[in-house]
Image: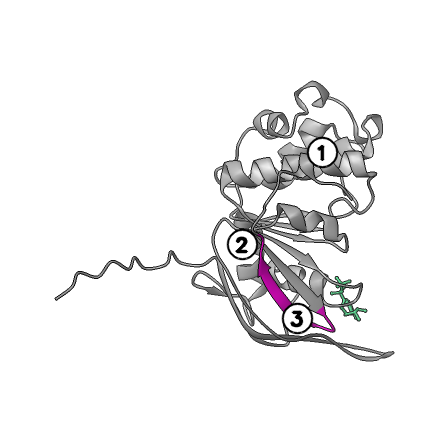
Amino acid sequence: MSESRTTPDPEPAFVISDLCKTYVTEAGTVKALRGVNLTIERGETLVLLGPSGSGKSTLLNILGGLDAATSGSARFHDLELVGATTTALTLYRRKSVGFIFQFFNLVPSLTARENVALITEIASDPMAPEEALAMVGLSDRMDHFPAQLSGGQQQRVAVARAIAKRPELLLCDEPTGSLDSESGVQVLEALAKVSRDVGATTMVVSHNAGIAAMADRIIRFRDGGITDISANRQKVEPREMTW
Ligand code: ADP
């Protein structure tokens, strides 16, 4: 009898099946997601591309526990997010998810260090705010207020804030959308570094195809569905990217 040499795949971070989201508003019904299927491996970086309105942010918000799906399944290890209670979703977000949005959402009256500390105070095994800020290259800006920092520096504070609780998932929605390309590259460099250092599974939504170069896999969206998934054979460091 031959010895089996197959090793079982490590458990994926997410298994998403037939995920649907319909928004019902006074203006009408919008099918934002029409049956999304995707398995996301632990530690991989996905870039989600597609035209505006194709459902990328909706998927990210559901996976981050910020929005509820209409039907289907999105399983994070043993936790089924579809139909989960508000309390379960709050605990999930607090423990497992770091968010980065297009607009940095820092508290203007708090320093960089204090903005990061806001999150580390409610996390169970956080790194020190100083360590998180050092990881994004802001050791010399810790006591600055947001208004004293450039847009790119503010976004790096947001990256430090997202990562300081060592989340398993890092969800980024247009993280460079309001930055010039040089600041954008610095933010993506910080993102790639912290994501690697804490081993986070990272999803980056963008309408900028240039960002795809940093992905392990590129997921393309159209009309609420995935049209293409491709492995990126030539993953590059953000500093080598141009757009
Ligand atoms: P993308 O991130 O690809 O730009 P979105 O996920 O934001 O796309 O949007 C998908 C569709 O869902 C769009 O038609 C959008 O207008 C609609 N949509 C998103 N959020 C809401 C909401 N809160 N209420 C109603 N419709 C929404």
Instruction: Write the residue at 70% across / 18% down.
Output: 140
Q: How is the image coloured?
A: one colour
Q: Is residue 228 magenta?
A: yes
- Furthest-front residue in view? 234
Quadrant assignment for the N terminus: bottom left
Compare residues 141 and 113 and report the one nearer the observer. Answer: 141
Q: Earlier in the sequence, mark 3 or mark 2?
A: 2
Mark 1 CB lies closer than 8 A to ligand 1: no
5 with respect to 54 (left or right) = left
Q: Residue 46 falls in which quadrant of the image?
A: bottom right
- The location of residue 208, given as percent across then percent down, is 76, 52
Using the image, determine if residue 207 lies above or below residue 221. above
Q: Where does label 3 land, which residue?
A: 227
Task: Please tell me the numbered disc located at residue 91.
Answer: 2
Is residue 16 at all visible to an observer of this figure? yes
- Furthest-left residue in view? 1
Circle 2 sits in a helix, a strand or a loop, which is it? helix
Instruction: Write the residue at 79% across / 27% down.
Output: 145
Q: Residue 5 falls in which quadrant of the image?
A: bottom left
Compare residues 215 and 145 and report the one nearer the observer. Answer: 215
Q: Are marks 1 and 2 in contact (CB under 8 Å)?
A: no
Q: CA distance from mark 1 to mark 3?
A: 30 Å
Circle 1 sits in a helix, a strand or a loop, which is it? helix
Mark 3 neighbour class, 10 Å CA radius: few under 14, some 14 to 19, many 20 or more? few
Q: Earlier in the sequence, mark 1 or mark 3?
A: 1
Q: Where does label 1 land, which residue?
A: 186
Q: Which mark is nearer the camera, 1 or 2?
A: 1
Task: Please tell me the numbered disc located at residue 80.
Answer: none
